[in-house]
């Protein structure tokens, strides 16, 4: 999950997004967590307005600390590729940071869903630096995967990497790199 602002003290949990209601901004609700402690509820109605952050009962002091922490972060730099102009700098506030986190979490979830659909339905492999799959072959329908993958490898002139044989996080990172054109970090 990537955001413009790099920090690890403020996170979100219980993110619920209503894509159908998202117009100008992401329509969502979430719990804001500061240093591992849930401190606030956040919500945005998706119509382009602000994200509202309300302290949970007894957490007003921690919410104030989180707001101060967010304000102390360096400004976000947005390069909008405007000619002869400096990049746009935005001072960080807690609601801005919460918006970034919600957007990043939602985008990551959508990617994970697409990956899960692909990895479950296709025999995905990397050959010649490209992500490929076998048409008409469903991974779920293969009874003896080990034998099938060995046979697939034997038919190839060059070595291949079969995503279904990798740990899930490694397979996701490789899939994402090829689908989005991301460079490995």
Image (spheres, rainbow, N blue to C red):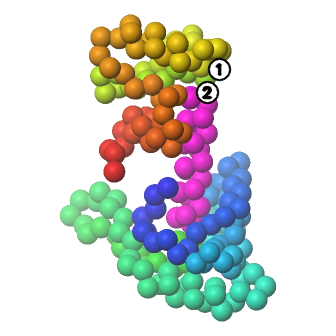
73 and 24: which is toward the camera: 73
Label drawn at residue 46: none
76 and 118: which is toward the camera: 118
Q: Which residues are magenta?
A: 99-119
Q: Residue at x 48, y 24 (%)?
A: 124
- Local SS, label 1: helix
Q: Main secondary structure of the magenta part?
A: helix
Residue lying furthest right in this view? 57
Q: Say if the magenta span includes residue 27.
A: no
Q: Quadrant of residue 65?
A: bottom right
Q: Quadrant of residue 76?
A: bottom left
Q: Residue at x 75, y 81 (%)?
A: 56
Q: Disc 1 marks which residue?
A: 140
58 lies left or right of 175:
right
Q: CA distance from mark 1 to mark 2?
A: 6 Å
Q: Say if the magenta span includes residue 107.
A: yes
> How many numbered marks appear?
2
Q: Residues within 10 Å of mark 1 (few under 14, many from 20)?
A: few
Q: Position of residue 96 (x, y in %)?
A: 53, 72
Q: Position of residue 26 (x, y in %)?
A: 62, 58
Badge 1 vs badge 2, beta-carbon distance below 8 Å: yes
Q: Disc 2 marks which residue?
A: 120
- Local SS, label 2: helix
131 and 106: which is toward the camera: 131
């Amino acid at each position: 999950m990537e955001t413009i602002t790099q920090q690890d003290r403020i996170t979100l949990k219980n993110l619920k997004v209503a894509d159908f209601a998202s117009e100008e901004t992401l329509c969502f609700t979430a719990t804001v967590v500061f240093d591992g402690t849930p401190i606030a509820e956040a919500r945005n109605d998706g119509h382009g307005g602000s994200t509202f952050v309300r302290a949970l009962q007894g957490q007003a002091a921690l919410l104030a600390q989180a707001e101060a922490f967010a304000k102390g972060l360096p400004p976000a730099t947005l390069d909008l590729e405007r000619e002869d102009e400096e990049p746009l700098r935005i001072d960080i506030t807690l609601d801005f940071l919460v918006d970034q986190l919600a957007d990043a979490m939602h985008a990551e979830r959508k990617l994970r869903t697409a990956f899960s659909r692909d990895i479950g339905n296709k025999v995905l492999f990397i050959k010649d630096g490209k992500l490929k799959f076998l048409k008409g072959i469903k991974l779920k329908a293969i009874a003896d995967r080990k034998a099938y993958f060995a046979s697939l490898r034997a038919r190839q002139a060059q070595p291949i990497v079969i995503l279904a044989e990798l740990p899930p996080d490694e397979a996701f990172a490789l899939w994402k790199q090829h689908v989005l054109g991301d460079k490995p970090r």
